[in-house]
Image (cartoon, rainbow, N blue to C red):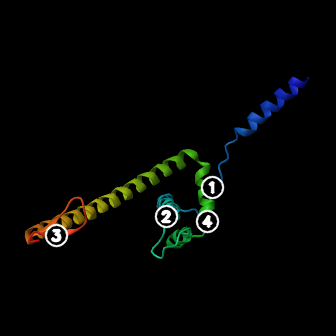
Amino acid sequence: MKNLILFVLYISLCLACTGNTIYKEPDNLIPRDSMVSLLTDMHIAAAAKPIKNLDQKRDLNYMQLVYDKYKIDSLRFEQSNTFYTSKIDEYDKLLKDVRRSLEAKASVYQFEKNKRDSIKKSKLKINDSIEVKKGVKIKKDSTKVQNEDE
């Protein structure tokens, strides 16, 4: 008898967990393409939270800036996000688009960083060659600069 009760409870628990709820589309649903951009910016804002800003402050709430940029509030985002997450296959595609967008932005920023670094390196090489032409000798094992005349 005890095994029968446990079996019935187990089956009812398994059947209760298989429900797939799809929510009704909210009246103020954020369009899919805007949702991709919004989630991209939200991921960037979340990643920027522990980074110090120009005022040397950290742990600022950048999410409000994202909401302001898209002229929405957190309730509208929650309703739209809940609707999109109820359709897991569509939400998975949406998140893949977000990932592609983040990777594209990262590659652009990495390209810009590499370009700035190469400009800095070329300026250093130019400065080094100018110093050599002027007769300034730099010792490799120290940071002191000596004139060749000394």
Q: Nearer the viewer, residue 120 or 109?
A: 120
Residue ID for mark 4: 76
Residue ID for mark 3: 146
Residue type at tag 4: Arg
Within 10 Å of disc 1 (Cα), the crowding (few <14, some 14-19, many 20+) is some
Sequence-wise first label, 4 or 2: 2
Q: Nearer the viewer, residue 68 or 133?
A: 133
Q: Position of residue 20 (x, y in %)?
A: 67, 43
Q: Dividing the image into 4 quarters, which one contains the C terminus? A: bottom left
Which of the two marks, 4 or 2, is nearer to us in this view? 2
In the image, taking residue 13 as reference, residue 43 lies left or right, namely left
Tag 2, which secondary structure? helix
The part of the image, by quadrant, that contains residue 127 is bottom left
Residue ID for mark 1: 82
Residue type at tag 3: Gln
Instruction: Check whether the beta carbons of the residues at disc 4 and disc 3 lie within 8 A of each other.
Output: no
Sequence-wise first label, 4 or 3: 4
Q: Position of residue 38 (x, y in %)?
A: 50, 62
Tag 4, which secondary structure? helix
Instruction: Check whether the beta carbons of the residues at disc 3 and disc 2 lie within 8 A of each other.
Output: no
Which of the two marks, 3 or 1, is nearer to us in this view? 3
Sequence-wise first label, 3 or 2: 2
Residue found 12% across the figure and 70% down from its top: 130
Residue found 53% across the figure and 69% down from its top: 58
Residue type at tag 2: Ala
Residue 91, above or below 50? above
Within 10 Å of disc 2 (Cα), the crowding (few <14, some 14-19, many 20+) is some
Q: Which mark is residue 48?
A: 2
Q: CA distance from mark 4 to mark 3?
A: 67 Å
Residue type at tag 1: Thr
